[in-house]
Structure formats: C-alpha cells, structure tokens
Image: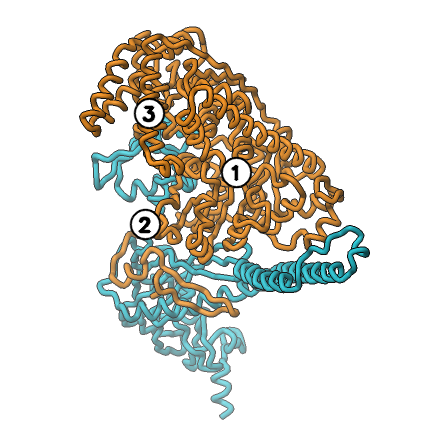
Amino acid sequence: MPTNDEPLQVDSQGSAIRLTDAFGLGRSLLAGRFNSLSWLNLCLKSYGLTIQPETGTLLSGPLLGTRIEMMPHQISAALKVRDRMNGRALLADEVGLGKTIEACMIYKELALRGLVRKVLILTPPALVSQWHEELRTKFLEEFTIASGPRKLADFDLQEKLIASIDTAKRPGVKERLCSVYWDLLIVDEAHRLKNSRTLNYRLARDISSTYLLMLTATPIQNSLAELYNLVNLLKPGLLGSRLEFQSRFSADSKGRRVTNQLALQRILSDVMVRTRRKETGLPFTRRFSNTVRLVPKASEYRLYNAVTDYVRSCYESLPEARRIRAAPDVFLLITLQRQLASSTPAISKALRKRRERSTPEGAREIDELLQLSSHVKEDSKLIAMKELVEATSGKLLVFTTFLETQEYIRASLEDLGISVTCYSGAMDEGERQRSLNAFREGAKVLVCTEAGSEGMNLQFCNLVVNYDLPWNPLRVEQRIGRVHRIGQVNDVYIFSLTVRDTIEDHILGLLYEKIQLFQLTIGDLELILGDEVRRIEPRIFRSFMENDRKGAKKAIEKLGLDLVGRKRRADSAKGRNDAIFEAVNLSPLEEGDK
Amino acid sequence: MSSGIRDFVMGYLELAGHEVRSDCDCYIVRFQSDPDRIHAITFSSEVARRGQCELVALGSPFFSGILEDTRRRGVAAARLPSANLEVALSSMTSGTCRAVLGAVEEMSRTALKLYYLLTCTSHKRSQRFVELALDASGQEAAWLYPVRNYINDEKPERVDVKELELVLDRSASILKKSVDQELKDLKDESGRLLASAVDRIQSYYAELRDETRNEAEFARSRAERPPSARHGISPVGISFEEAEGLVAEYDRLEELEIGRERARYDVRAEATIVGVLLVSYNVLRCHVKLQNEKASSEIVVQVLPNGDFDPPICEACNKPIMEMRLCPNGHVVGQECIEVTAPGETRCVACERDSNR
C-alpha cells in the first residue's frame, strides 16, 4: 500500500503518478479500523469543499474578509497575479495602497489551493517584525524569523521563513537558502534589487522559486534600467537584451524618459501590477500634526536632569567598542532615557529594578534619583492629557511605549470619570479583542502600547496622541497607521506631547518636523531612510551622550539635514515613477471597478 | 458563506457527538471528549468581524482542524444485501421459458471501492476524483459503481490482508490507464510553453554574450588607436578576459534559468487516496431449472447483489446469454439463436445443427 513516506511511482506517458496516502487510510484498512459510512461520506464531501477550480473569486475571500478590509484594487491584483501572471509579478502600487496585504492575499490564496507550502519572505531589516505580525494577526500564519545563531541553525528546514535581506545574503546563509526550491519567494521593497551588480540582486536571482512576488512603489529610482533588472528576475529576457531594451524604450541616454509606451505597457502587463491612488476612488484624508510643548515643573526638571546625568555617566563608563557598535547595554540606557521622558512611574519602576542589581554605591545613587521622583506629584504631560481628553469630543487613541505609563494614564483618566480601555502585548488575544470592542462601542480613550498593536484597524477613530515619542520614525508611522489607513473617512489629528528641552523635544523639532514625518507613510519612510532607520536610535542617543546641550542640538540638526536630503531624493524618485507610469497603464482594475 | 461549509461542519459536529447550541448567529460547541472545553463559531462574516466568535471558513483554524480529523476517518465497511432472486430469475428468461429456483448456496465475497483525488500539476493545476471498484481478485467490478443500498456499518468478520494489499496495488495500474490521456494533453501543452520559455532565455543570453564580446572588441580597437584618433574617448571597457568571465557566468545563469523553467513546466500527477469502502456481499450460487411446455434443463448461475448473474453460454453460438430461452429440444440459447417457425412452434440454431449432422 502506498504511504506518504514511500510513494509508489507509476509511469504514465513518461510522467510519474505519485500515489500517496496522507491520512494513513491504507494502514487503517489493513488493520481493520473502520468508521461508519457516514464518516466516509463526510470525508469525501470535505474534498468537494476544497477543490474549487473556478477562477474569478478568491478562495481566501471569506476568511480574510473578517480580518482585513479587502479593497477592489487588491482583489483585482490578486486575481490577476494568480490567474494571468502565473504567480510571478512585480507589485508596484503607489505608496499607501496596501502592497503588503496584496502580497499576503496572493500567498494565502496559493496556499489554500495547495500550491504553496514553502515560503521565503525577504524584507528590509526594519520591516521583518512588521511582516511577522501582519501575517500572524491578519492572515493567521505563523512564520519563523531567521535571526540569531540558534534560529539560523535549521532555518532552511522551515516551511515559512522571514529573513532580512542582510541576513539572507550572509555567506553560509545565502548558499543554504539557494539550495532549497521555494514554492514562493516574496521580496519587499524590491527597489533594493535595482542594481544587477549588487549582492542583493544576486541573492534574489540565485534563489529558486515557483512563484515570485516583488513589492516596490518605485521600481524606477534613477533609470529605466532598474525596471529592466527587476523584470529580468521575474522573466529573464522578457524585455530583450539590455541594449535592445535601451534602444527600444529609453527616450534619453540616462533612461529617465520612456518611449514606445504602448509596447512597454503590453510587455509589462504580463508581469507588473501598478494601481495609482486616483484609480482606486478611495478617499485619502489628510493628517494634521500638533505638538504640545510643555514647560516642566521644577521637580520634573530636577528629575530629568539628574537621571540624564546618571544615564550619561553609565554610558561613559562603557568601553568605547560597545558604545560604537550599540551593544545591548547601550539600548538599555536608551530605554532608561525614554522611560524618563515617558512618565514618572515608568522611570521610577525602571530605577527600582536597576537598584536590585546595583552595587551598594550604585544603589545609593539610584536612591537619590528615586527621592527626586517622589517629589513629582503629577506629570505635566498627564495634566495636558486630561485637558486634551476633556476638550475633544471624539475618541482618542493614546500611545505610550511603557506599561507603567499606560496604567498611570488609565487610572488618572478613570478618576475623572472618563471611560478608558487598554491594549498591550501583555494581554491575551481575547482580552485584546474585548478591549478593542469596548473602544469601538463606548470607551472614549484607548491607551495602547506598541507591542501587539500592528494588527489593529481603528479607522473609526481619528485622534491620535503620542504620549511619549518613539525615537525610531517607523514606530511613529506604525502608530498613526492604526487610524490613518485605507477606510479612514475623516482627517486625522495627531497630538504629540513633549516637555521642553528634553531629547524628545529636540527629536520632534529638529528631526521629525523637518522631514514632515507625520505626513509620511511606511512606504515613504522606507524610501527615505532605507537601512539608516536601524542606526537612527543609537545615533540620536550618541549625539546627546557625547555632546553638551548645544553640541547635541547641532548633531541632531545635522541628522535632520541628512534626512531632508534623503527625502528630496526619494521624492524625485517618486516623481520619476509617476512620470513614466503615467503613460503606461498597468492597473489591474477594470473600468467598472474604478 | 457557502452552505456547503455550513452543512459539512454541522454534519461533522453531529457525527462527532459534540454538543452544539445556537446563540443568535453564533454556535457554541462543547466538545464531547472534554466537556469543559467550549468554542464559539459562526458562519457569518459580520458576526466574526465583531470579534465574538471564530468564522468558520476555508483556512480558519477550526475548519482546518475538523477537515483533518474528518479526512483521517475515510475508511468504512458496509455490507450489501443479497439479490432478490425472484426479480433476478424473472429477468433471466423470456418467452415461454420459466426459471424455477432450486438449491441456493451463499458465497461470501469482498470488494473495495477506492476514492482517489488526482492532482495534475504543471504550469497549471487540475484536480478531480477518481472512483475505482475492484473485486477480491483485483478485477474492476463495474457493477459496484452505481450500487448505494448498503447495510450501514456492517464490518466483515475477518479481513484478508494479503488480498487487500493485492487489490490496492492493482488499483494503481487501473488508475494509470484512466489518467493517461489527461496527462498526455497536459504534457503537450506545457511542452509548448516550455519550448517558448527556453527559446526566450536562450535568445536573451545569446544576445548578452554577443554584446559582451562586442564590447570587449570595441574596447580593444579603441585601445589600439593612437591617442589622437580616440576623439577624446578614453580606452576603457572590458578586457577579453573579463568578457569571457562574464560569458561563463551567463552560461551558468542560462542553465539555471532553463532548469527552473523545466521544473515549472514539469508535469506531475499525484493520486491521494481519500476514501476506502470495504464492501462485503454474498454471491448466490443458484441451481435453476429452465422449463417450457416441451422441455426442461438445469443450469447453475451466480447472482450478484444487484441481480446481475454470470451469463450462461448459449448452446448454439457459445456466446454469453443475458436473456435465456429454452428450445423444444431443451437447448439453452439466447434470443438471437431461436426462431419462430410457425405459430407456437420454435426451433433453435443448435437443433438445426444437430439435425444437419
């Protein structure tokens, strides 16, 4: 009897028929283990439910419909990629139209049809956890993240793997990824593969997969040659040789303008989907950012300065090598500094914890800080928060990074008789769901930590409060993205609370406002920051720890200018794509869908 | 939500003996094996969106779990009732011939109905069910296909493992015959597409190689010119060695890409056994006396549960007879071998042959 382990091969017209018994029915038969006829009938009926060869609908539609808002352009794109592009496509929707969701929909669809089992997702390092969370919360898919020596040991045996491009191209890792034939490879922010001479490009080229999805809003950053390189990964030779392509489609020597648009459109429509915002008919509302700069009370000012000096002295005591490569103890200090900016309860708890591991001398130093913290009766930010809640009529989504701050806000607002609910990574799935329902159905305020917040869709709310401020710009956008996303019908108002002359205050004024961070989407940020995003936090911290106040401001200003330059370059790349693709229609939407 | 999924799930819960309580659009399931464990499900996307209970749909954890459990239970046994001999006998004869039943022996038999899910995959994929019915000797038992009047859940007294193994193996070759044409068509189609993909890749790399060598040639000719004839263009470019290195890399990539296309268009067929029904039944070995006004004859027939019987052989033409006639001289013949010679008078081909001798 054929078993799953030992398939019987029967040659038929030169092709083997593999006989399998995935559920051990042959063994049950031979062992005389029988079920009732009703079970057999039900069993046969079950296959009827999963064999659905019809095209034009998504098998995954009913399931995903409860977890995500599937937009017509995403459904059309998924169907087009599945039915007409054979699962190999460049998903190049404009920024903010949900390419990640589109790719996950295609994956889920192929998986439900039994076509995909082994999946590899390559993303920029900063987006690895976001992909992981999106897949887990919205698509019920558990992926393994390839990171750390233990997880790397058997990563190529994993069926569902997410790796950062940087990890994947490491010697030793790359070879193992390339030795596996993947069913599906997804490459996010695929403009990182634009240059065919780079390791990134070679990595994607050398990984074999049946299906391939590449995601980027800007397939062309500088020249048409970059688009050529990306298409060559999907279907080598589709656009002819490089010279042929240049002479046929490039209107200038630098490949900045396109000619023969219709011919290019015809070829690209085999491998590329690009929906523009204006084609979706979706309302895209605006964002308004408001900074609430607060003057600290004397007790707060003393605490802030004392703890900052303490953090600085800890930093200075670290060996230089650890400071430079931002070792874990540097991140601990960054967290301490951020807890200080978040709330008095947050820093007090952190200090008490630190005291437990300290030498007697260190403990004495911390006791002095705790003494200062006890003098702060109520944080200025909390007072401002209460005023804000009382002054607004709509629902407020309040973000903080720390659980102690979350509790501090909740308790204080509830004392005022305001209905508050909380959401954090410390809660289980049921508690979180109940909390979201409470917010949707009645509570005025939801106080949320970042952890676990990636799956939330809160378009019914349009007021966001940054009670404390992440130093990583991507985190800021992830917060705003909970409410300012497809489906939001109102303008979104963002309030950021900072205390004057703190690190956060400088980050907000000299960095975020310079690049108009609050107006940018994740896609925009990825284009602007690229890998720099990972370095921003330690860079900011170093600026403050290694300079006096004036010097720190200067260093942050310099970082701001650097980001402005990056933003300008990203804007011009977007403009180039807009100009080129304006004439090349690759929208998956039929006239009726628009 | 498809009603198929709802029917299936409710059918499962009932068969598995789980307690189900309906609460608006939610169903509260209490598991039979663990009464403390309850699970709220719904078939309504709207209700699920409110987060109260889990939507049961393709791909949802609850649905996937019960699919797997159900699919492990696809082995059943059933018995078929024996043939109604009165009906069977009446269908055996025609004309004035009557069949009178004599001694009947019961012979116990088994057969297998096997259900395969056949999946053919290449650049596209198709799936369909294949149902096979085989008797204990491994021969296809076509009579069993339409039969549905099982006596539920009656298990055979003993299972002949060797016999079943033989039948299961035999099913593979019958299966093969039934999919040959389908696979051939798919292979033809994917072969055409593969040829076109290989052609695209080969021409692409051929052009790349030409361009690379031309570039090296061009760089060399520039370098050989005196500086005054270079028109300000510096003699940079790739050397022949570099060009050959690139060409070797293109050869490797070409081979890799063609290999991938071959894998993509490779035709694969997988038959997964998804259901097995062991059917027990009796074959009735009947002694039948055929008689008319002038003659009688005794034959033995084996009657299957659906009333089919082993056709006796015509004494005139030696072919199997489905409807027996008896000639005045007692020959058992078929309809075609008997003729009416006068009103009430018949004569068969066997009688004619005897008289000619």
Residue type, label 2: Trp
Callout 1 secondary element: helix
* Chain identifier, colour cyan: B
Q: A565 or B104: which is nearer to us?
A: A565
**Circle nearer the N terminus (3, 1):** 1
Mark 2 and mark 3 lie on one chain; the one further toward the N terminus is: 2
On the rendered structure, is B93 left or right of B256? left
Which tag is nearer the camera, tag 1 or tag 2?
Answer: 1
Marks 1 and 2, how far apart at CA: 38 Å
According to the image, label 2 marks what residue?
Answer: A39
Residue A549 coordinates in the image, percent (x, y): 43, 19
Q: Which residue is mark 3?
A: A311
Quadrant where the C terminus of chain A sits is top right
SS type, badge 3: helix
In this rendered view, identify the residue nearer to me: A302 or B333.
A302
Would you call the spot at circle 3 few (<14 residues within 10 Å), some (14-19), or many (20 or more)? Answer: some
Which chain does tag 2 point to? A
Q: Residue at x 56, y 21 (%)?
A: A285
| Residue A102: numbered disc | 1
